[in-house]
Amino acid sequence: MVDKLRVITDYLLKAESVVILPHINADGDALGASIALALALKKMNKEVNVLTEEEIPNNLNFLPGQDLVNQKGPEVYDVAVNIDNGDITRLGSREHYYHSARIRLSIDHHSTNKVEADCSYVDTTSSATGEIIYDLLTRYMNAELNKDIALCIYTAIVTDTGCFRYTNTTSRTLSVSSKLLEYEIDFPFVIKKAFDTMSLAKLSAIRQVINSLRLYEDGKIAVSYLTKKDIEIYSLKPDDFEGLVNIGRNIEGVEVSVFLREDGQDLFRVNLRSNDYVDVSKIAEGFNGGGHKRAAGLNISKKLEEAISALVDATISEIRGND
Ligand SMILES: [Mn+2]
């Protein structure tokens, strides 16, 4: 079998210019993995840009290497790397950078990944794309880690594992994290910033989400939402939506939590989470979305009540199929 990380390494080492492209609404894993790779390539004297759709959110503004992050860059690079993204259209307005690069690479851990590339590496057993980047840097690229790179990879792993609480956490996740702590990173600060600190706007969003909560299927399904009007009233930013889907999931007896937010008129971004046995990536795929067993997402273009009933129906079939 071809060792794809070896192929990716060869392309990266040969490149003079590299653009790194995480998915839209880049989270701790997408940004942490991207910047870690960028910092390592920079140390090898390569021209490297991380291009994001949005500015770095407040809860991740402690990440080092932000001078390498921009929203725009030169049009053509030797190599483009798609990071933590299973669907190339989720590069949003930056998709052209991927297609116009001489070589296109993709590194991801989503089981629903369908990205086309000159070399695509998908490892669904990795807790985070950051965990793959650790392997790539240390075992393949012979890159020397430093405190900044370690902090980025640690952030990627803690955010995607919910501080090592989700089932994607493996013994390898913990041994990689243990190696990262050898760089004396300020991990309580990372966790406080990424998980515990919130704006007043976010707190208002939580209150609104709780008000909107409804249960279905004997309390196994929780649905909550924010409308465009709610989002405007509280001036919510994309990172304020982070984690809101967990409010429903944490209710005793709930198996699947469905959270909708209205992105445009009658256009909703939907997050799905499950606790024990429902594969929510299957529900998401039914609406052309994707993700993992316990966490998935999709877009739906319907009126709120119609969207909710379509999602609840699909979730009920998955739940009953498992009973
Ligand atoms: Mn990820």
Image (spheres, rainbow, N blue to C red):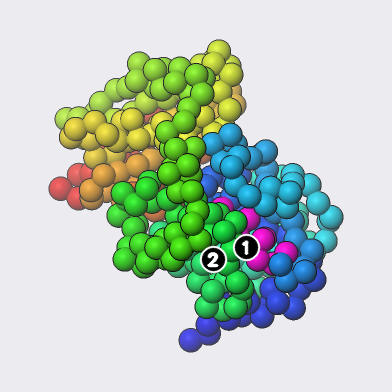
Locate residue 290 relative to residue 66 in the image: left or right.
left
Residue kind at label 2, given as amino acid type = Ile
Q: What residue does disc 1 label?
A: 37
How far across and down, in percent of the image, does residue 197 sit?
47, 31
Would you say the residues marked 1 and 2 are in contact, meaning their CB atoms lie under 8 Å apart?
yes
- Residue 77 is situated, as x and y percent measured from the top left of the image, at 80, 64
User: Where is residue 251 drawn, in percent x and y?
Assistant: 24, 31
Characterize the magenta stretch by its predominant secondary structure.
helix
Q: Residue furthest front?
A: 184
Picture coordinates of residue 312, whole percent (x, y)? 32, 33
Q: Is residue 89 left or right of residue 125?
A: right
Residue 198, placed above or below residue 318: above
Range of magenta residues: 32-42
Name above or below for residue 141 compared with residue 88.
Answer: below
Which residue is disc 2 drawn over?
133
Q: Is residue 215 visible?
A: yes
Measured Cα–Cα span from mark 1 to mark 2: 7 Å
The answer to whether the residue bearing label 1 lies less than 8 angstroms from the nearest atom of ligand 1 is: no
Q: Quadrant of residue 149?
A: bottom right
Q: Residues within 10 Å of mark 2 (few under 14, many from 20)?
A: many
Identity of the residue furthest to the top in this view: 233
Residue 272 covered by magenta stretch: no
Element type at marker 2? helix
Other-residue count near label 1 (Cα within 10 Å), few / some / many at <14 / 14–19 / ≥20: many
Task: Name the residue type under label 1.
Answer: Leu
Q: Nearer the viewer, residue 319 or 227?
A: 227
Residue at (50, 71) in percent of width and height: 135
Q: Secondary structure at mark 1?
A: helix
Is the residue 4 above or below the residue 275 in the image? Answer: below
